[in-house]
Image (cartoon, rainbow, N blue to C red):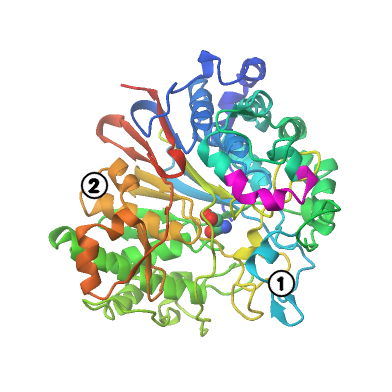
């Protein structure tokens, strides 16, 4: 635990009333006073602060808060709340996440874990029936997969400790967007369509997300979510308590324990375990971020329950032993894939919620362990490899680890990156797990509940990442902040389930070693090797000349569809900022700066 200290809050208290009035009375995004970039651009360069998200409205909201004197934390929460409206299948108050915060005044990186927790009554065999584990969709579309949401607690904790504004203030742009609506794009329509046969079973989901005739909303139509606006208004009024106690909490527990299914539902929706006590007792936790040095830079990542920081960190440690700049691109990519492979073998075996199991984090991140793993790498693809033993490098302790394959699916989640004029930075990844979460919209409140508990190794009753009451499932989310002698150099993150780790790693390697700019690294074709015989890759990667050469080394690529949709900010010389969002995937994102000069 890091001690609680307030930064920047006191000084800004005086202006809070004025700001509140200003923000509350602002109409929706159309008001040019809080309009940031008026067009959706994936790259922006300038100064005074920057925001990169997957969505124009969210980037606008973040920039508006920065322009009104808010800091990076204020802007991140404002943007995140808008994403909860416009990207409701990827993130929101029904889910959880990890926020990394760099505070310029003391040059420290902090991390808030507000990932969902399993309800207390849950047992390791919760996803078994008649001795057999439930198929993924049966586990997912149910009350069973729902963890106690952490998002609102995380937002409040972040603002309390580091913000200059209240939840009430920063939720106003999102309330406007929820009430006044946003234009449906192809990604939103497709994601609705993909969930339609399940939303159709749950009247609250159908009412919120489908047209009255039961179809997905048309591209170009306006989507409004007045019930979500009402939920945000309640949170704005009462703070996180308004979410964790009272009617929203009661409605969530009821929807989980007794899924609100229609009489003519086509699927069986299993009940879950979440009680109002589980909801009321949820707390967000401050975690010590992971840190590795890489070519003179310090790379900070998310500690357990995420496997993001340890796995990106281990892979970087392995890669540091190669002069990636001086070898051919094809050879460098081979080492990137092999470093990913070995780190994933270790991640799969050893990482779970460190509040419940001993995770050899120090060992996993040690340079000596990386050297041991590197020594196993040859010029050929290794296929599936066994985990190593990080314990001797852990300064004590032992354990065998439980070798396992990567189970998690999903292309959901969202990542946003914010910097302010003071030099504070936020890298924030949050999620409801699968695209569309559990499929259950909380009746009356317009938001989807997560299916985060399918991130447990729920097919095992002994794995370090098995289900346990009160535990957080292992995550792959990898919000990352890179410092150069204590000053921000780069902040980045991505959605994409367990591919998040390899996407963030690839972006770092592309940017730091292989000569790509940040926008190029974010746009580049991707491959994700997670200790398998084959490597999932995008078609553009498979078609590249390097991939042809890599096949001669034994790499087998299979089409993995789109991988990731990252955003990031690079800190350029002279105080300039380069904000970059995914240009194509998922319809492309939006980057903006406070001042374009
Ligand atoms: N639930 C996943 C995790 O925490 C993220 C989901 C996704 O990106 O698809 O790692």
- Quadrant showing the N terminus: bottom right
Q: Residues within 10 Å of mark 2 (few under 14, many from 20)?
A: some
Q: Nearer the viewer, residue 361 or 380?
A: 380
Q: Is residue 193 magenta?
A: yes
Q: Please, is residue 191 above or below residue 115 in the view?
A: above
Q: Position of residue 252 (x, y in %)?
A: 79, 49
Quadrant in which residue 130 is drawn: bottom right
Q: Would you place residue 471 above or below residue 462 in this image?
A: above
For label 1, being within 8 Å of ligand 1 is answered no
Q: Residues within 10 Å of mark 1 (few under 14, many from 20)?
A: many
Please indicate whether residue 531 sits to the left or right of residue 206 in the image.
left
Residue 577 coordinates in the image, percent (x, y): 33, 32
List x then y, in percent, for residue 424. Answer: 44, 37
- Magenta stretch? 191-204
Residue named by callout 1: 127
Find disc 2 in the rendering and name its residue.
516
């Amino acid at each position: 635990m890091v001690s609680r200290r307030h930064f920047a809050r006191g000084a800004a208290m005086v202006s809070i009333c004025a700001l509140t009035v200003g923000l509350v009375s602002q109409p929706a995004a159309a008001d040019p006073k809080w309009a940031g970039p008026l067009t959706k651009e994936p790259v922006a360069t300038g100064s005074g602060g920057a925001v990169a998200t997957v969505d124009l409205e969210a980037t606008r909201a973040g920039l508006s808060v920065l322009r009104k004197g808010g800091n990076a934390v204020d802007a991140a929460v404002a943007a995140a709340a808008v994403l909860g409206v416009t990207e409701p299948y990827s993130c929101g108050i029904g889910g959880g996440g990890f926020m990394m915060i760099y505070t310029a005044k003391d040059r420290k990186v902090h991390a808030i874990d507000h990932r969902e927790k399993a309800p207390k009554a849950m047992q390791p065999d919760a996803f078994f029936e008649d001795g057999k584990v439930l198929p993924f969709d049966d586990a997912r579309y149910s009350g069973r997969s729902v963890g106690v949401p952490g998002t609102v607690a995380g937002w409040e904790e972040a603002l309390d400790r580091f913000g200059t504004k209240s939840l009430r203030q920063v939720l106003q742009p999102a309330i406007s967007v929820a009430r006044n609506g946003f234009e449906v794009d192809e990604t939103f329509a497709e994601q609705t369509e993909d969930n339609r046969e399940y939303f159709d079973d749950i009247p609250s989901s159908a009412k919120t997300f489908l047209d009255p005739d039961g179809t997905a909303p048309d591209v170009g139509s306006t989507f409004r979510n007045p019930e979500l606006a009402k939920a945000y208004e309640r949170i704005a009024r009462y703070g996180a308590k308004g979410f964790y106690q009272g009617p929203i909490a009661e409605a969530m527990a009821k929807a989980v324990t007794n899924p609100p299914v229609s009489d003519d539902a086509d699927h069986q929706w299993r009940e879950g375990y979440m009680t109002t006590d589980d909801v009321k007792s949820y707390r967000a936790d401050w975690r010590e971020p992971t840190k590795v040095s890489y070519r003179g830079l310090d790379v900070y990542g998310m500690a357990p329950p995420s496997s993001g920081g340890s796995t990106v960190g281990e892979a970087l440690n392995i890669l540091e032993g190669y002069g990636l700049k001086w070898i051919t691109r094809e050879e460098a990519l081979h080492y990137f894939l092999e470093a990913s492979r070995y780190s994933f073998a270790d991640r799969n075996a050893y990482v779970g919620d460190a509040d419940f199991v001993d995770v050899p984090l120090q060992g996993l991140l040690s340079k000596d362990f990386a050297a041991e793993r590197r020594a196993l790498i040859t010029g050929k693809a290794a296929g599936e490899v066994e985990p190593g033993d990080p314990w001797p490098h852990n300064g004590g302790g032992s354990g065998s680890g439980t070798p396992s394959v990567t189970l998690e699916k999903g292309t959901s989640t969202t990542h946003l990156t914010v910097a302010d004029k003071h030099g504070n930075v936020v890298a924030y990844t949050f999620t409801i797990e699968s695209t569309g979460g559990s499929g259950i919209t909380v009746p009356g409140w317009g938001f989807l509940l997560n299916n985060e508990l399918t991130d447990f190794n729920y097919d095992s009753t002994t794995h370090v990442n098995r289900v346990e009451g009160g535990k957080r499932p292992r995550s792959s989310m990898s919000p990352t902040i890179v410092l150069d002698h204590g000053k921000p150099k780069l902040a980045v993150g991505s959605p994409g389930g367990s591919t998040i780790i390899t996407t963030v790693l690839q972006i770092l390697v592309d940017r730091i070693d292989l000569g790509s700019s940040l926008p190029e690294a974010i746009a580049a074709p991707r491959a994700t090797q997670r200790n398998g015989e084959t490597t999932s890759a995008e078609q553009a990667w498979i078609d590249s000349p390097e991939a042809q050469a890599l096949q001669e080394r034994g790499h087998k690529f299979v089409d993995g569809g789109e991988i990731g949709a990252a955003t990031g900010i690079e800190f350029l010389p002279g105080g300039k900022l380069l904000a970059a969002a995914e240009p194509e995937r998922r319809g492309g994102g939006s980057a903006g700066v406070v001042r374009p000069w």
